[in-house]
Amino acid sequence: MKKEAWKSAGTAVYNINYHFVWSTKYRRKVLFPPVDRTLKMAITALCTEHGYELLALEVMPDHVHVFLSASPKTAPAVIAKVLKGSTARTLFTKHPELKAKLWGGHLWNPGYYVGTAGQVSRETIRRYIEAQKTDEGGE
């Protein structure tokens, strides 16, 4: 792994990147301009506020992709809660017309997808770990 990809937080050195995907309630296609722009600005601001490094962001009509890096001290579930909860409040406040399409006060489906990514593949890490004993003069 390239050293420049490493980040430091207290006692941990890390390179953790999360890919989050979540969808609108009932998969309603409501994230069109100008709502999508408001959502992108809100996510960008939240990432800055919470110390997440935003790597990529795309808003589709019925779902959102967010790729970010965060400290291992912050659980992915917390990141999802922050992003989904705050953006729902922001969008309902700035675009009250959404409430007509999404009754019940929910913008997002309750679930989400999260996957991790680093600089190296799972296979590379497996080979590295398996080679440790032979590289250090072990058995």
Image (cartoon, rainbow, N blue to C red):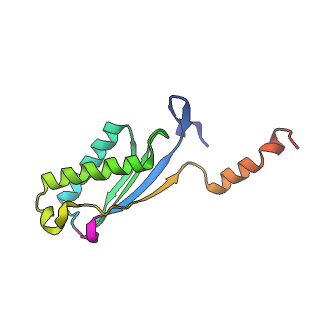
Q: Quadrant of the C terminus?
A: top right
Q: Is residue 57 left or right of residue 115?
A: left
Residue in view at x 41 percent, y 50 percent: 77
Choose between 133 and 75: the one closer to the eye.
Answer: 75
Q: Is residue 25 left or right of residue 98?
A: right
Within the image, what quadrant is residue 21 found in? bottom left
User: Residue 56: within the magenta?
Assistant: no
Residue sticking out furthest to the front: 104
Q: Is residue 131 visible?
A: yes
User: Residue 26: within the magenta?
Assistant: yes
Residue in view at x 35 percent, y 38 percent: 50
Residue in view at x 47 percent, y 39 percent: 71
Q: Is residue 71 left or right of residue 125?
A: left
- Residue 17 screen position, x and y as percent: 48, 48
Within the image, what quadrant is residue 13 found in? top right
- Residue 19 screen position, x and y as percent: 44, 55
Residue sticking out furthest to the right: 139
Q: Quadrant of the N terminus?
A: top right
- Residue 103 screen position, x and y as percent: 17, 66
The residue range painted magenta reads: 24-29
Above or below 11: residue 35: below
- Residue 5 screen position, x and y as percent: 53, 40
Above or below 138: residue 92: below
Q: Is residue 61 visible?
A: no
Count of numbered tags: 0
Residue in view at x 39 percent, y 46 percent: 78
